[in-house]
Amino acid sequence: MITFDFLFPPILGCILIVLINVYFGIHVIKREIIFIDIALAQIAALGGVIGGIILNSPGLGHEHDEFNLLSYLLSLVFISLAALVFTLLKHKKIPIPLEAIIGISFALATTMAVIILDKAAGGDVHVHDMLIGSVLWISWNQIIRLAIVVSIVSLFHFIFRKKFMNLTDAFQDAYQTFRKPRLWDFLFYFSFGVVVIEAVNVAGILTVFAFLIIPASLTAFTTKSWMRKIIAGWIMGITAAVSGVFLSVKMDVPSPPVIIILLGFLLLLGYGFFKIKAFKDL
Amino acid sequence: MIDNLLFLAPPIVACIILAGVLGYFGNHILSRGLIFIDIAVAQVAALGTMIGILLGFAENSVNTQLISYCFTILIMGVFSFMRIRNQVLPQEAIIGILYCIALGMALLLVEKIPGGSNYITKTITGNVLWVTWNNILFFTLLFIPIILVHIVFGNKIKQVTLKHNLKDVNINVIRLYDLIFYVTFGIVIVKAVPVLGIFLVFMLLIAPASIVNIFTEGWKKRIIWSWVIGSLGSILGIYLSYSINISNGPAIVCLLGVAAYTVAFVKLLKKQPEKIN
């Protein structure tokens, strides 16, 4: 018998991630910087790894409930550096897509972590854990931390929602006409990075990436209104999260694949629905 | 000294050949904006290998490899037919979803294979130092027909990549050229990843193409310079890794990555945007 007590924390964790990631996902798809979440997660991890090495205890941080202030601060430093680079290199003098810059920083951060962890035993285990993670073993401490970070970032984005939404809508064509685009760009990447650190720590890169991209992909086919897009994404993400966690416990399989397959299924279903609707509207 | 040279000759030759092929494809995928496609393809191929093993074939058997290739080609075919004229959802997002689902499936299958977790992370690190002359001969032979296909259809594929005058072309014709492109690309990636590792393949695709895109225009020039930069980066990286004793793959990746950033920032700091041509 599966108890409610056991299911409740992971479902709550997933819902918190869905709430913020659907919003960021719409930004990310409009800006065509799909893999930024994986890149930021690796960059933050590099900070954590360096912090662990300085404290002479490699691998620290992939244990749940452990909080290491130095590693966390270094992660924040690395995230802000990356945010700065992404902001500066989005420039009309640089004719390559920002996604390429993100890709290069992703590969750099990962291989640097591999070089460093080469010296420390169990490095690949750490990489593996981070990729897959498991939301099933989330603790209340982690939920509280996640909730605090999500509320602060949401509040910040809610207050300045006009700025962020307009900037993203203007990202491809009218970037230069925006007032102080670089400042808002930096704040966007930095706040996203702070969320990614927390979310990946709880659910692993793969699940966080799925919650970011798949619900937001569905909303690409819907109306232009941001609010409707967000609500459609929330419905899809929360459905997949709740049923995914439940099914994975019930069938005793890892939760990330179940959640991803459910999201993929809902995406197909939703896509079909919008196609039929568009066909009827003709 | 001579011994060292003999020992390092196969990896250097392998890197030069692969830098050329990957530099060519890199310019294509950079112009198409599909930066992470090779990571998705590698994951799909790994999933194909796992399916082969689950069907009861040995890991390195011809059957398993064949299943892996067929599976990859199938997925690439589906992907190229998902191109529509008015792309609401960026293709890179479809790549992201593909990567996600392939990795998720691999995680489910992994529990059914003894020692399965090796297959997920196996592709992450390759080691080019272990490459033999036989390997080199084999993948070079495989690349020759692919190069021929691209010599024959190169102009058309380039036109599709750069979106020149596509208004009047039938969408199915575009899809057909896409199919040729993605299938050949998939085969190259499946062959290159076990030799170099996923991150080195990724970097040889993206970094040289990015560097040349920042500094030159002109398609042919970009491809030739990508090859030169990729080869130089690899040789220097292998030399560095040999002399300060770190793994060679990460050394080349870091070298190329830092080079790309340096070039980008130099360009940014230049007051007057110079035309080089």
Image (cartoon, coloured by chain):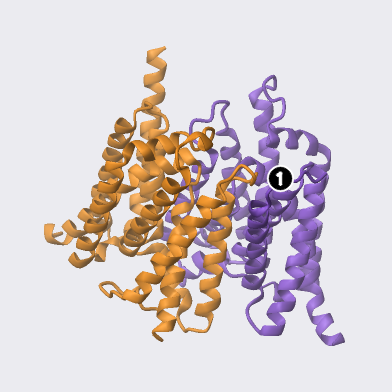
Chain colours: A orange, B purple
Q: Secondary structure at mark 1?
A: loop
Q: Position of residue B75 (x, y in %)?
A: 56, 44
Q: Residue at x 64, y 66 (%)?
A: B253
Q: Give the letter of the chain under mark 1.
A: B
For residue B174, say whether it is visible.
yes
Name the residue located 66 percent from the left edge and 36 percent from the top edge: B178
Q: Can you give x and y, in whole percent of width and height, for residue A126 in the image?
A: 42, 73
In the picture as drawn, the residue positioned furthest to the right comes out as B2
* Residue, disc 1: B273
Q: Is residue B146 visible?
A: no
**Image point 71% across, 48% down: which residue?**
B213
Extreme residue toward the top, this view: A282
Which sits in the foreground, A155 or A36? A155
Across and down, in percent, residue A78 comes to 45, 65
Along the viewing direction, whichever of A196 and B147 lies nearer the viewer:
A196
* Mark count: 1
Query: On the rendered structure, is A222 left or right of A10?
Result: right
Residue A15, relative to residue A60: is it above or below? Answer: above
Q: Amino acid at mark 1?
A: Pro
Instruction: Kindly identify the residue that appears in the image at 78 percent across and 66 percent down.
Output: B232
Give the side of residue B62 with respect to residue A21, left or right: right
Q: Nearer the viewer, residue A78 or A1?
A: A78
As drawn, B97 above or below A224: below
Query: Where does the image place residue A189, in percent across and percent down from the top left?
Result: 42, 52
Name the foreground residue: A217 vs B33: B33
Compared with B1, B115 (above or below) is above
Which quadrant is home to the C terminus of chain B? top right
**Outermost residue, front side:** B271
